[in-house]
Image: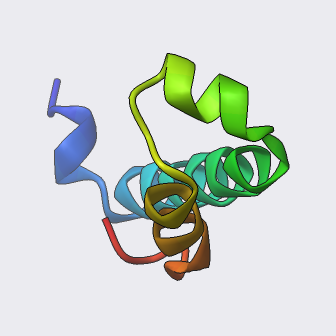
Amino acid sequence: MESRAAHPLLRALDLLALWHRRGSTRAALRELPPERLRDIGLTEMDAAREAARPFWKG
């Protein structure tokens, strides 16, 4: 049996899932209040910069 990475369709699905997670995470980051950002060690500028990144950029 070949690994999941050897199948182009499964690799594409994995990539789509990764992009979706990134988009969702960045959208959630946009919604966090400053005190929550501080709790996770981010400044508002850090969060804004990360949230503005395109979903396809790691």
Vertical arrangement, residue 14 with respect to residue 53, above or below? above
The colour scheme of the drawn protein is rainbow
Residue at the image point whose x is 35% and y is 56% from the top: 11
**Residue 20 left/right relative to 39:** right
Give the x, y percent position of residue 12.
45, 64
- Judge by depth and name the residue closer to the eye, 45 or 17: 45
**Residue 37 left/right relative to 45:** right
Q: Name the residue furthest top.
A: 39
Residue at the image point whose x is 53% and y is 28% from the top: 38
Vertical arrangement, residue 26 with respect to residue 39, above or below? below
Which quadrant: the N terminus? top left
Residue at the image point whose x is 50% and y is 66% from the top: 45
Which quadrant: the C terminus? bottom left
Give the x, y percent position of residue 46.
43, 59
Residue at the image point whose x is 27% and y is 36% from the top: 4
Give the x, y percent position of residue 42.
44, 40
Say how many tags the image has: 0
Give the x, y percent position of residue 6.
17, 50
- Judge by depth and name the residue closer to the eye, 30 or 44: 44
